[in-house]
Image (spheres, rainbow, N blue to C red):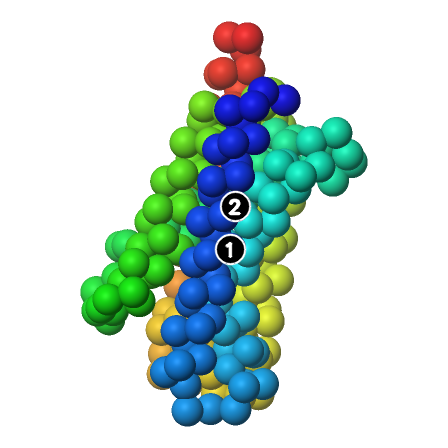
């Protein structure tokens, strides 16, 4: 593993951990609900889980380069899946959610880190530094397991608590039919981006 790869991964990791902690502190300072409920709501966001995944991935690449866990996160299928997830985070936020609120000050900086800066940096890392191989097309179905489990949890928790982290999955406002349609549309976004990443992987691997 070359030094530049680990250095870039370390930079992404530091940025991610900083943004996640800062976002929690911002949420805590603005919250009027119990700490326990705040923690549950904080970890109800796909953005937080995915940035946490990126942070763990990059941390393991840096700290455990010759260990099984480091090898796992440098596997093409793993790093491509992580790239897919964070790209969807950035895409949906910047197209659908960005205009629903206007954070200011440090909240704006952290918001950009989580939804724009980290996705771009991960894409650069994947494109320039991650190992490539001829990935099988069916890998995309394994990559959909994480967002599918997240959706099931979000709907289940929403029914119990009345809290939905994103407006496009808010059953109490949209109804279950519309939420399912939105979920299918987002699934297609995952499929399209995932297949595109696989195609790029295959082309680069063949050239090598």
Q: Which residue is found at the position 44% from the left and 80% from the top?
A: 28
- The label shown at residue 13 is 2
Q: Position of residue 108 (x, y in %)?
A: 27, 63
Q: Is residue 7 above or below residue 182?
A: above
Q: Position of residue 94 (x, y in %)?
A: 28, 54
Camera-side residue of 26 and 151? 26
Q: Say which quarter of the image contains residue 181.
A: bottom left
C-alpha separation, residue under disc 2 versus residue under disc 1: 6 Å
Q: Secondary structure at mark 2?
A: helix
Q: Secondary structure at mark 1?
A: helix
Q: Which residue is found at the position 39% from the left and 55% from the top?
A: 114
Mark 2 vs 1: CB contact within 8 A:
yes
Which class describes the residues within 10 Å of circle 1: few (<14), some (14-19), or many (20+)? some
Q: Which residue is found at the position 51% from the left and 82% from the top?
A: 38
Residue situated furthest top in the rendering: 207
Camera-side residue of 164 and 19? 19
Q: Report whether 28 appears left or right of 135.
A: left
Q: Is residue 11 above or below residue 200?
A: below
Q: Position of residue 16 (x, y in %)?
A: 48, 52
Residue on which the image places disc 1? 17
Camera-side residue of 60 and 187? 60
Q: Position of residue 89 (x, y in %)?
A: 41, 53
Q: Is residue 65 above or below residue 20?
A: above
Q: Is residue 71 above or below residue 206?
A: below
Q: Say which quarter of the image contains residue 186.
A: bottom left
Q: Is residue 52 visible?
A: yes
The N terminus lies in quadrant: top right
The C terminus lies in quadrant: top right
């Amino acid at each position: 593993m070359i030094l530049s790869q680990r250095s870039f991964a370390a930079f992404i990791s530091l940025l991610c951990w900083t943004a996640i902690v800062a976002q929690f502190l911002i949420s805590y300072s603005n919250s009027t609900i119990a700490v326990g409920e705040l923690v549950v709501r904080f970890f109800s966001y796909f953005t937080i889980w995915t940035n946490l995944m990126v942070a763990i991935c990059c941390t393991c690449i840096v700290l455990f380069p010759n260990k099984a866990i480091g090898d796992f996160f440098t596997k093409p299928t793993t790093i491509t899946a992580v790239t897919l997830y964070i790209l969807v985070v950035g895409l949906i936020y910047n197209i659908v959610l960005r205009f629903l609120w206007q954070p200011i000050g440090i909240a704006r900086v952290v918001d950009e880190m989580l939804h724009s800066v980290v996705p771009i940096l991960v894409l650069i890392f994947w494109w320039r530094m991650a190992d490539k191989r001829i990935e099988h097309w069916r890998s995309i179905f394994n990559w959909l397991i994480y967002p599918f489990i997240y959706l099931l949890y979000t709907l289940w928790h929403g029914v119990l608590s009345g809290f939905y982290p994103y407006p496009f999955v808010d059953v109490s406002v949209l109804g279950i039919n519309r939420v399912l349609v939105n979920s299918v549309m987002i699934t297609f976004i995952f499929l399209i981006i995932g297949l595109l990443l696989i195609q790029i992987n295959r082309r680069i691997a063949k050239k090598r």
